[in-house]
Amino acid sequence: MLDTGLVSQIKLASVKLATKYMKKISAELEAVDAGGQEEEDLVLQGVRFAFRVHQFAGGFDVDTMKAFQELRHKSRFQEHINDHE
């Protein structure tokens, strides 16, 4: 069953890619002062991608979870969501 090892490697690479992608979006959130729709779009794009990877890989590793939490904390959009709950 060589395919099993290959699938595991693809899943691990996907999780690493999600980590890098969320860190990139976190950095962009710091650089973007506009807020509003641009920030919301960045956050939604990152969360959607992370969710797809999470579903495919069967979860996140510790580093990816930290990147996700960092994205959540840096997002002013999160504050907007909390205000409407």
Image (cartoon, grey):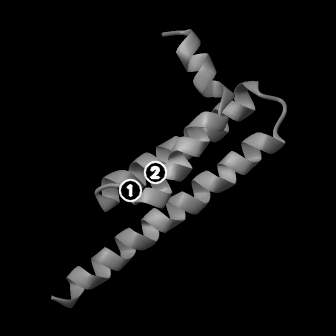
Q: Is residue 45 above or below residue 6?
A: above
Residue 62: x percent and y percent? 43, 58
Residue lying furthest left: 1
Residue 2: x percent and y percent? 21, 90
Q: Amino acid at mark 2?
A: Met
Seen at 74% across and 24% down, the residue is 36
Q: Is residue 75 above or below residue 30?
A: above
Seen at 33% across and 61% down, the residue is 57
Q: Is residue 24 above or below residue 43?
A: below
> Sequence-wise, which precedes: disc 2 or disc 1?
1
Residue under circle 1? 60
Q: Residue 40: which quarter of the image?
A: top right
Q: Amino acid at mark 1?
A: Phe
Q: Residue 61: which quarter of the image?
A: bottom left
At numbered mark 2, what does the secondary structure look like: helix, strand or loop?
helix
Residue 71: x percent and y percent? 60, 42
Relative to 81, 75 lies left or right: right
Residue lying furthest top: 84
Seen at 71% across and 27% down, the residue is 37
Relative to 32, 17 lies left or right: left
Relative to 11, 14 lies left or right: right
Q: Confirm or deny contact between disc 2 and disc 1 (CB under 8 A).
A: yes
Seen at 84% across and 33% down, the residue is 33
Quadrant where the N terminus is found in the figure: bottom left
**CA separation in Å, label 2 and label 1:** 6 Å
Residue under circle 2? 65
At numbered mark 1, what does the secondary structure look like: helix, strand or loop?
loop
- How many other residues sit within 10 Å of disc 1, few (<14), some (14-19) or many (≥20)? many
Residue lying furthest bottom: 2
Residue 41: x percent and y percent? 65, 35
Residue placed most toward the observer, 62 or 41: 62
